[in-house]
Amino acid sequence: MNWNQIEGNWKQFKGKIKEQWGKITDDHLDTIAGKRDQLVGSIQESYGISKEEAEKQVGEWERNLKD
């Protein structure tokens, strides 16, 4: 699944994101509005991890959506 599909169906993916990253709030999700770089930044900030680690987690999450 490509990010354009995720962005286009953001409301449907918000729940899946909250399952994966429980510290991400609804307010964060509304602000992110499907933008991948903003999701990565929010994960980085919420979990105190590096940008590279947040990118890796989002990449893994994207790949798992195909399963």
Image (cartoon, grey):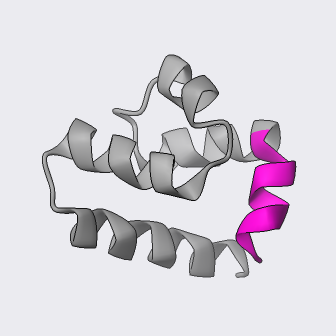
Question: Which x, y percent locates residue 17?
Answer: 55, 47
Q: Main secondary structure of the magenta part?
A: helix
**Left or right: residue 51 compared with residue 18:** left
Decide which of 32, 61 is in the foreground and name it: 32
What stretch of residues is rendered in magenta? 1-10
Classify residue 23 as left or right of residue 60. Answer: left
Q: Residue furthest top?
A: 27
Q: Tell me the quarter of the image containing the N terminus.
A: bottom right
Q: Is residue 27 magenta?
A: no
- Above or below residue 59? Residue 47 is above
Residue 62: quadrant of the picture: bottom right
Which residue lies at the image location 86% right of the left edge and 51% below the top edge? 8
In the depicted view, which residue is nearer to us: 19 or 11?
Answer: 11
Total labels: the figure holds 0
Q: Position of residue 2 (x, y in %)?
A: 75, 75
Residue 50 place in picture, x, y as percent? 16, 62
Quadrant assignment, res 64: bottom right
Vertical position of residue 52 compared to residue 19: above or below:
below
Position of the C terminus, as image quadrant, is bottom right
Please say if 3 is above or below 2.
above
Left or right of 22, for residue 9: right
Query: Which residue is at a point 76% across and 43% down the rendered structure image?
Result: 10
Measuring 52% from the left and 39% from the top, which residue is drawn there? 18
Asked if residue 6 lies in the magenta stretch, the reply is yes
Answer with left or right where residue 2 lies relative to residue 21: right
